[in-house]
Amino acid sequence: MKCGFNRLNALRTIKPNQTISIVLSFEPEDECPFHQKLRVFSETSCVSVALKGNGVKPEVQIEPSIGLLNTGAVFIGEHSEHNMKIMNISKFQIEFNIKSIR
């Protein structure tokens, strides 16, 4: 399993009193907490920072939960209306799309 954290930019020499940025990405592969330590070494020192992230999965449920909405018999030229519920069971707001079957 990968750690989820990656360094994106190249490291450069740092001049006296100069600051550079280290660009990190977090790409979790599982729905779980991730922990890693980033260590920066020079010829005479080592500093570190703890990296922490949580992989989460956007998830919705539908009702009817059996995945079938049975309209029953409907006369030709008539229509029937039925409600279906979509519930976000994630711990965060998500967007979703509905693709038509037409």
Image (tube, rainbow, N blue to C red):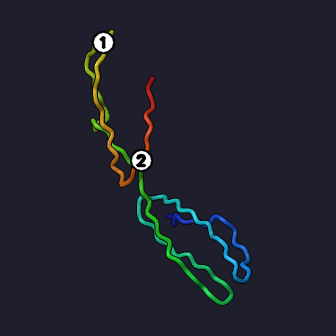
What residue do we see at 28% from left, 38% from top? Answer: 65
As shown in the figure, which amino acid type bears the numbered disc 2? Ile
Q: N-terminal of the two: label 1 or label 2?
A: 1
Q: Measure the C-alpha gap from mark 1 to mark 2.
A: 36 Å
- Can you name the residue that lies furthest to the bottom here? 44
What residue do we see at 57% from left, 62% from top? Answer: 25
- Residue 61 location in percent, x, y? 33, 43
- Residue 29 as seen in the image, left or right of residue 14: left
- Residue 97 location in percent, x, y? 44, 37
The residue that disc 2 covers is: 94
Q: Nearer the viewer, residue 13 or 65?
A: 13
User: Where 71 falls versus 52 (above or below)?
Assistant: above
Residues under numbered marks 1 and 2 in contact, where contact means CB atoms less than 8 Å apart: no
What residue do we see at 50% from left, 75% from top? Answer: 50
- Residue 77 as seen in the image, left or right of residue 34: left
Callout 2 environment at 10 Å: few (<14), some (14 to 19), or many (20+)?
few
Which labelled disc corresponds to residue 78?
1
Secondary element at image label 1: loop
Q: Nearer the viewer, residue 70 or 79?
A: 79
